[in-house]
Image: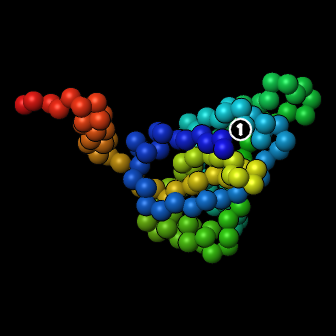
Amino acid sequence: MTMIKNRRALHDYFIVQKYEAGIVLKGTEIKSIRAGKVNFKDSYARIIDGECWLLNLHISPWEKSAYFNHDAERRRKLLLHRHEIRRLKTRVDEQGMTIVPLEIFINEAGRCKVTIALVKGKHTYDKRDSLRKKDLEREEHRGHGKDI
């Protein structure tokens, strides 16, 4: 199973709720995803006219295709239930949250799925706390306790 994670999202945001969504892709895009040619930098989801769209997700063009290649940063439709889209829209509008992709993967049935999350932005001091906790866990995992 191919899985590509957005590690930056865990650093920049508090995750409130996760959703698994299908994604509408072209043939060359799925080949690039299987090869791991995905960049999540500055990608986010938006609800436009009652549909959820993934914006700024960079899927590199397939090298072996010359004519039928895709635009690397085109907007892609996410497949969610109507009630999930409604719930996401109200949370984003009322509480000022954001929808970001956490990971993109291909499930056992061969379908490409995206895990999106409703997130709230972290402040600078929250990010420093996260880094400190991560460093402590890493040191603890290595077996070198810090002597203070």
The image quadrant that residue 38 belongs to is top right
* Amino acid carrying mark 1 in the image: Ile
The image's colouring method is rainbow
Q: Nearer the viewer, residue 85 or 95?
A: 85
The answer to whether one can see residue 48 in this image is no
Query: The C terminus is located in which quarter?
Result: top left
Against 10, residue 140 (above or below) is above
Residue 92 locus on image (x, y percent): 51, 63
Q: Nearer the viewer, residue 61 or 91?
A: 61
Q: Badge 1: how crowded within 10 Å, few (<14), some, or many (20+)? A: many
Residue 141 locus on image (x, y percent): 29, 35
Residue 65 locus on image (x, y percent): 87, 28
Against 89, residue 44 (above or below) is above
Residue 68 locus on image (x, y percent): 90, 34
Residue at the (28%, 30%) spot, across then down: 142
Q: Is residue 41 left or right of residue 74?
A: left
Q: Is residue 97 left or right of residue 66?
A: left
The mark tally for this picture is 1
Q: Secondary structure at mark 1?
A: helix
Q: Is residue 75 left or right of residue 128?
A: right
Against 77, residue 93 (above or below) is below
Residue at the (52%, 56%) spot, across then down: 117
Q: Residue furthest left?
A: 148
Residue linked to disc 1: 33
Q: Nearer the viewer, residue 141 or 72?
A: 141
Q: Residue furthest bottom?
A: 83
Residue at the (41%, 49%) spot, across then down: 13
Query: The N terminus is located in which quarter?
Result: top right
The answer to whether one can see residue 9 in this image is yes
Residue at the (71%, 61%) spot, across then down: 79
Q: Residue furthest right?
A: 67
